[in-house]
Amino acid sequence: MDYDELLNCMRCGFCLPSCPTYIESGKDEAHSPRGRIALMKAVVDGEIEPDEEVKRSLDMCLGCRACEPVCPSGVNYGHLLEQARDIIYQNQEQPIPVKAVRKAAFQGLFPHQNRMIGLTGLIGFYQRSGLRTAARKSGMMKLLPDSMRLMEKVLPDVPTSKAMKQRQRLFQPTVPVKKRVAFFAGCLMDTVFLSTNDATTKLLQYAGCEIIVPEAQACCGALHGHSGEKQQAKTMAKRNIAAFEEAGIDYIITNAGGCGAFLVDYGHLLKDEPEWKDRAEAFSSKIKDISSVLVELGFDKLPLSLQDEIITYQDSCHLKNVQKTFMEPRKLLSCIEGAQYVEMKDAGRCCGSAGIYNLVETEMSMQILDYKMKQTKATKAKTIVTANPGCLLQMKLGIEKEGLSDQMRAVHIVDLLLEAYENANPSS
Amino acid sequence: MLTKNGLEVLTAIVGKENVETSQASKLVYSFDATPQFQSLPDAIVSPRSASEVGQVVKWCSEQEIPIVPRGSGTNLSAGTTPLQGGIVLLMKHLDNILEIDEENLTVTTQPGVNTLELMEAVEAKGLFYPPDPSSMKISQIGGNINENSGGLRGLKYGVTRDYVMGLEVVLPNGETIRTGGKLAKDVAGYDLTRLFVGSEGTLGIITEVTLKLIPLPETKKTVLALYEDMDAAARTVSKIIASKIIPATLEFLDQPTIKVVEDFSNIGLPTHAKAVLLIEQDGDAAVVDKDIARIVSICEDNQAIEVSMAASETEAEALRSARRSALSALARLKPTTILEDATVPRSEIANMVEAINRIAEKHQVEICTFGHAGDGNLHPTCLTDARDKEEMKRVEQAFEEIFTTAVALGGTITGEHGVGAMKAPYLHLKLGEAGVEAMRSIKQAFDPKNIMNPGKMFANENRKRVVVKQ
Ligand SMILES: Cc1cc2nc3c(=O)[nH]c(=O)nc-3n(C[C@H](O)[C@H](O)[C@H](O)COP(=O)(O)OP(=O)(O)OC[C@H]3O[C@@H](n4cnc5c(N)ncnc54)[C@H](O)[C@@H]3O)c2cc1C
Ligand code: SF4
Ligand code: SF4
């Protein structure tokens, strides 16, 4: 562990009011950033054993990093958490089924885009073949826990394997070229959320970007990094760095807050590998979220319109807390004619999705989501805009859970912007 | 020591989910914001009502089990470290505001209410609760009362003590008493209310409090004045007070502090200035304008190199919150940050600042200073590394000298952070032996078994400061 980083925490508690798990646990220090850092330090100092309760405290952490921007001592909590989880998971004997699942997901699936396509293709098959209807009708779904059942319901219709495999690699802008960019397509985004990725490239074309989508790119590795599979994350980082180095571009565009935040941190991930460190930093310095680049290229000045409705925005934790991108999405949304942007209270507080947190820590996740839905409802919004696939699914789940699916929708900001653009420019 | 049986009794009182004994829980409640102090409790108990507090205390009294009351654990005097084990009594469930009385201008609340939430609740009704410790986003009213916290507005509006009108307190024997109330006038007997304010959890548990409110000031203006040298800034402070203006806020930051705060807040603080004063006035618009105009001219007459006015409330709030983050921001520079709290009469500010710098140089330690210049409350903050034992010795010597100097200038060893375990070895410097004895006998009278936050306020025979764990 980075001991200096642990010592940087001076235990002032400034981070407590920003931590969703501290708040939702009824102010339990064991579920606060200050408490977690103290636990990590005590373990490193050999004062306590990393027992179940210590692990519990770390497991309950969303990794939302809301504690970082408010920490005046500049403690990089995200790095500490990653290291601690890495140590705990690598040294711990896990039950065999958990191990198998982790291995299948982290080594067998995410690093291989063709397998991602294969698996999501299966989901698509399930959705289209009539199996879904049959499963829902048969009552089989009742066997699943509530949150899983809802998840099954809110999962978008997956594109066909064919569509996923035929991804276009080069796009020319519809207006004179302003920037040459590469698109980081992501693993989940380029399968389950393929249509959002397509919308992203379209927006970039309208904004004046020449876009390449390097074929050799891989999953960003965030899920691995955050779950204590650091080696695997590093392997993927290297593949990505190499894949984008050749492109000769101004920016690398992301449209998933979670991926973006991990990509900007490659420099740190590979800091101990001299032959990679500089390359990683060069890569990271080019990462830009779609909202930022759109604002930079004046997309907010183009005609955008929707019908009369209220829209609100749910920050992606990592986009906000790590990439510090929170003004840009709001700026874009406020420029849409017809729609009225209303900020929800605590928009920056995590929605409880946090990778696979909502599946493994369902109770806490749902409690956090309930708070979020309360704030969303208070805005009277018809559309909740998000900037990360996890948040998008979680907000859909929230809508479903509240029984509001006929009055409210959750969309990715890119999809909404495209809708607004095409609405205002019917010829495009 | 708590036995298994004892835990069952406590569980029966507060419910299973409100008694924690896991190793992790004990660890996370073993410290507060004070560096270098840590000690494990035997259990953490979170009562749900004042009556449960009474039952827990009564039982602990019978068993002679130490009780450490805890708010949010942001104190800087090791006031909540369970030095002798026992239970940490968490106030997290007692977090309701009970009544905002707009006719009597009071608010009655449970102690676990967050300070900022209370301020916002009364401001929503056009009322004002002025004490604003920099930790207000985190701290609780109960913690504020027990530390008698002050803040940026202390100069004009006073500290927590000046707003506490009545208390409900569970005494160390488990009996509950009420002191004071909503009355503006009350001279029945000793002023126990004041005695409990600043008692640091050593005399009883506060379970309810009635606070005085005042009308919300109409307007506020914020000025930032920059200086080439610290003397000029300190002179300005004396001149402002001497010309009979009492600003709402008069804060001081030295150059190293400005630099780190800017590093954190990025609001464009003038890192080239050697010293900065943050000055605010509030109240009636015409008076504020007049006062601010005079303040600006006093600054200019005293060699301020630049005086600027915050253009908007957002800008002013950015300045204030930057100032509030000073302590934690300083923690970026070195692994260990030791903040002290020496206070002198405000006419002595310049002398004290000069003395601090001289002492730092003499002992070869790095000390940054910021604080509430207007009320003479300075926070010399030492940036060091606890792993460097040799340096830590010099740090101790430097602080000892700083305290002695403060007292010699007519000051005190702590202006707002309290004595706790941290300052206990120095209490006699301020009070003298007889003074310490008088206080000890009060403690003895209330808490003969010494179960309420033992080890705080009064040092054992050994006067040596206990910063470094040997
Ligand atoms: C970054 C930072 C800035 C700060 N700025 C200021 C400042 O500007 N001004 C200032 O005065 N202080 C300041 N402090 C110190 C601290 O925040 C205050 O002393 C605050 O009042 C403590 O509140 P708390 O709720 O955290 O109490 P705790 O730290 O939990 O407790 C403080 C004391 O009160 C006792 N206690 C708590 N609740 C009760 C109760 N209900 N009954 C009996 N005893 C109780 C505890 O035993 C302890 O002795 C600062 C601290 C930090 C970390
Ligand atoms: S705000 Fe930073 S320094 Fe303060 S307790 Fe939290 S992590 Fe530690
Ligand atoms: S990452 Fe989020 S959940 Fe975890 S400690 Fe920080 S604020 Fe709390």
Image (spheres, rainbow, N blue to C red):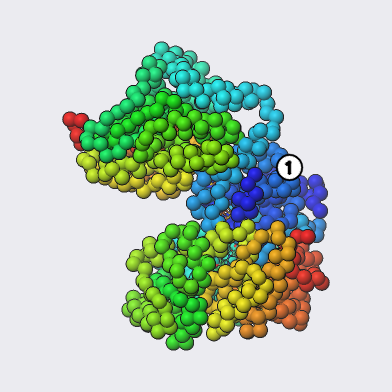
Quadrant the N terminus of chain A occupies: top right
Look at the picture and state if B188 lies above or below B33. below
Crowding at dot 1, Cα within 10 Å, few <14 / some 14-19 / many 20+, comes out as: some
Q: Residue at the location (38% across, 16% down)?
A: A162
Residue B261, percent across and down?
Answer: 49, 62
Q: Residue at the location (64% across, 69% down)?
A: B365
* Residue A310 in sight: no
Q: Nearer the viewer, residue B367 or A190?
A: B367
Residue B419, percent across and down?
Answer: 68, 70
Q: Is residue A213 left or right of residue B261?
A: left
* Number of marks in the rendered image: 1
- Ligand 3 placement by image quarter: top right
Residue B153, percent across and down?
Answer: 49, 72
Q: Residue at the location (71% across, 72% down)?
A: B397
Q: Type of residue at label 1?
A: Glu
Quadrant the C terminus of chain A occupies: top left
Task: Report which residue position mark 1 lands on.
Answer: A49
Report which quarter residue A311 is drawn in.
top left
Q: Nearer the viewer, residue A244 or A93?
A: A244
Residue B435, percent across and down?
Answer: 73, 81
